[in-house]
Image: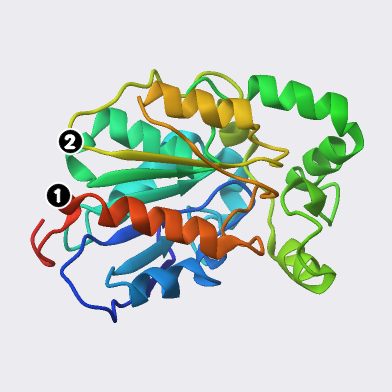
Amino acid sequence: MNLELLHVAATGPGDLPPLLFVHGSNLAAWCWQEHFLPYFAAEGHEAYALSLRGHGGSDGADQLSSFTLADYVADVRDVMARLPAPPVLVGHSMGGAIGQLILRDHPETIAALVLLAAVPPTGLGADTTRLVVSHAADVERMRDFNTGKADTFPIGLYLSNRLPEAERGAYAARLQPESDKAGYALTGRVVRARPVPGVPVLVLGGQTDRIVSPPSVRATAKAYATEPVMFAGMSHLMMLEPDWREVAAAVLGFLRDRPALTTMRGQG
């Protein structure tokens, strides 16, 4: 598979670990290009974002329905092997599940793990049930979108109405279907989580996230023996919300508070 890989070169001072951003369901690397890639590059990090197979500019769009979560893990591992040093993995939603699987199986390959509105280790079963009860019509539209029966995604599940309508519409137009196989894998237990010595984990979530509830964010943080950072008024697509800069600043603070994360570029 040829995978789309966006890169913004570091412009700030310091020899810092590269960051690899992993998108969630229905997205691609573009969601990080809007704000996060230039923000972290300006702070001295080589900033990368991939599109998983079947997403964005990567190969495999015609085979999307056949792809599994394990396929997506393989994509991230493939990109990681090309980077100049073990990266800080930043995973959103499904991308957070991928990051947790890599932490479990290959902890030596990452410098740290940042989880944004991530699928909890136990999966999204409870959150999906709650969502079906509270937003049944939107859930049905989302399923139709993922199976090609609808052209529009119910963007209110992903973004708050604090974002201007024109921006919401522009982002909604860039969403794409997701593999049912990968989605189904996220409803049950994803990983038996445990802290890994030497690999710090940051967990962030939104108080008004309709996909990954605050209790799920807290459960993820507890599994990794840390405290979550919660943002009021923040919906699921934290990297595109009006207050995205607050989220980015929290990630940057986490990185700066850990001197061990500094590394010489070019050394893996």
Residue 198 % position (x, y): 17, 36
Q: Is residue 184 visible?
A: no
Asked whether the residues under the numbered discs 1 and 2 touch, taking CB atoms below 8 Å apart as contact, a structural biologist would say: yes
Q: Which residue is mark 2?
A: 198
Describe the element under mark 1 as helix, strand or loop.
Answer: helix
Q: Earlier in the sequence, mark 1 or mark 2?
A: 2
Can residue 76 be seen here? The reply is: yes
What residue do we see at 71% from left, 65% from top?
Answer: 171
Q: Position of residue 55 (x, y in %)?
A: 56, 57
Q: Nearer the viewer, residue 71 or 196?
A: 196
Left or right: where 56 falls relative to 130:
left
What residue lies at 42% left-to-right and 62% top-to-bottom? Answer: 49
Q: Quadrant of residue 214?
A: top right
Residue 74 figure quarter: top left
Residue 189 in the image: x percent, y percent? 51, 19
Q: Name the image quarter holding the N terminus.
A: bottom left
- Up/down of 163 relative to 24, above or below: below
User: In the figure, is residue 171 to the left or right of 10?
Assistant: right
Q: In the rendered view, would you say 17 is above or below 9?
A: above
User: Which quarter of the rendering shows the C terminus?
Assistant: bottom left
Q: Amino acid at mark 1?
A: Ala
Question: Counting other residues with Cα less than 10 Å from the Cα at mark 1, is it few (<14), some (14-19), or many (20 or more)?
Answer: few
Identify the residue under disc 1: 260
At x 20%, y 64%, the residue is 16
Task: Give the number of callouts.
Answer: 2
Residue 85, image x, y percentages: 17, 58
Which residue of the protein is positioned furthest toward the right in this rendering? 137
Circle 2: residue type: Gly
SS category of the residue bearing label 2: loop
